[in-house]
Image (spheres, grey):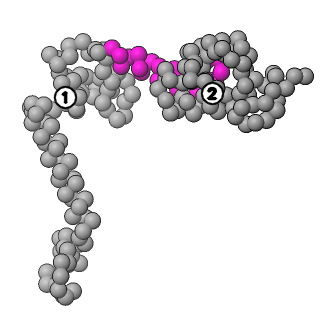
């Protein structure tokens, strides 16, 4: 039986432990990475790269959709296929994803900024397509953005106060010692 050494795990394995040239046909080299190492490589590629950047473990050639399907598990391929679908939909300027954190749906919204209210058909969540934020009833986009900025600044100030102070034992108002003795009158 012919043997070959895997470039990744450096183990000598039978030729049947390596992908066939038919499964990875877009490459002009022999397959020198065993199936288990190839599978691990694809899992990492799918989890860490854009769907169209998943590459061969031996060269920078991007794998085709069919090659990924043939060479990985059903679970990894489902992640890969989902990323492919999302990228395809994102390329359509009329497609919008729902901004609700509890929803992963999306739909076409051909009105654009002329029809700024996007209402998700799946969950009913509304957001503004002009400023890509949750719908701001009775506010312009500028007013809504200013309010969000104020809220963020207030939150940051509150966190800073919590870092540098402690609550008064009597009234719980935040206090900070800046100098002098430890005596305090509430």
The one nearer the camera, 164 or 183, is 164
Q: Which residue is mark 2?
A: 57
Task: Work out whether mark 2 precedes mark 1 in sequence or the reverse, and give the earlier one.
Answer: 2
Region of the chain picked out in magenta, as a range: 69-92
Q: Is residue 36 visible?
A: no
71 with respect to 62 (left or right)? right
In space, the residues marked 2 and 1 are separated at their CA atoms by: 41 Å
Q: Residue at x 17, y 42 (%)?
A: 148
Identify the secondary structure beneath mark 2.
loop
Dominant SS type (magenta): helix
Q: Is residue 172 left or right of residue 26?
A: left
Residue 5 lies in quadrant: top right
Determine the residue located farthest toward the right in the rendered image: 1
- Residue 177 in picture, x, y percent from top left: 20, 78
**Residue 173: x, y in percent?**
17, 71
Q: Position of residue 183 (x, y in %)?
A: 18, 87
Compared across the picture, whether 161 is left or right of 103 comes to: left
User: How busy is the neighbourhood of tag 2: few (under 14 within 10 Å), some, or many (20 plus)?
Assistant: many
- Residue 131, placed above or below residue 163: above
Residue 8 sits above or below residue 19 on the image: below
The secondary element bearing badge 1 is classed as: loop
Residue 160 picture location, percent across and down: 23, 61
- Tell me, yes or no, whether the two marked residues, 2 and 1, touch with CB atoms within 8 Å: no
Q: Nearer the viewer, residue 161 or 6?
A: 6
Q: Quadrant of residue 186?
A: bottom left
Quadrant assignment for the N terminus: top right
**Does the magenta run of residues contain 35?**
no
Residue topped by disc 1:
131
């Amino acid at each position: 039986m012919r043997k070959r050494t895997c470039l990744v795990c450096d183990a000598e394995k039978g030729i049947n432990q390596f992908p066939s040239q038919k499964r990875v046909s877009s490459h002009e080299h022999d397959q020198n990475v065993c199936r288990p190492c190839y599978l691990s490589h694809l899992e990492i590629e799918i989890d860490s790269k854009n769907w169209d950047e998943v590459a061969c473990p031996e060269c920078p050639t991007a794998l085709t959709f069919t090659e990924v399907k043939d060479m990985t598990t059903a679970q990894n391929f489902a992640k890969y296929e989902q990323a492919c679908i999302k990228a395809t939909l994102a390329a359509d300027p009329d497609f919008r994803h729902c901004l609700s954190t509890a929803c992963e749906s999306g739909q076409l919204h051909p009105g654009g900024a002329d029809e700024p209210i996007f209402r998700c058909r799946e969950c009913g969540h509304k957001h503004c397509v002009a400023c890509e934020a949750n719908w701001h009833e009775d506010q312009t986009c500028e007013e809504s953005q200013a309010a969000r900025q104020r809220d963020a600044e207030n939150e940051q100030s509150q966190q800073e106060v919590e870092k540098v102070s402690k609550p008064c034992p009597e009234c719980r108002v935040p206090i900070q010692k800046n100098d002098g003795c430890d005596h305090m009158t509430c």
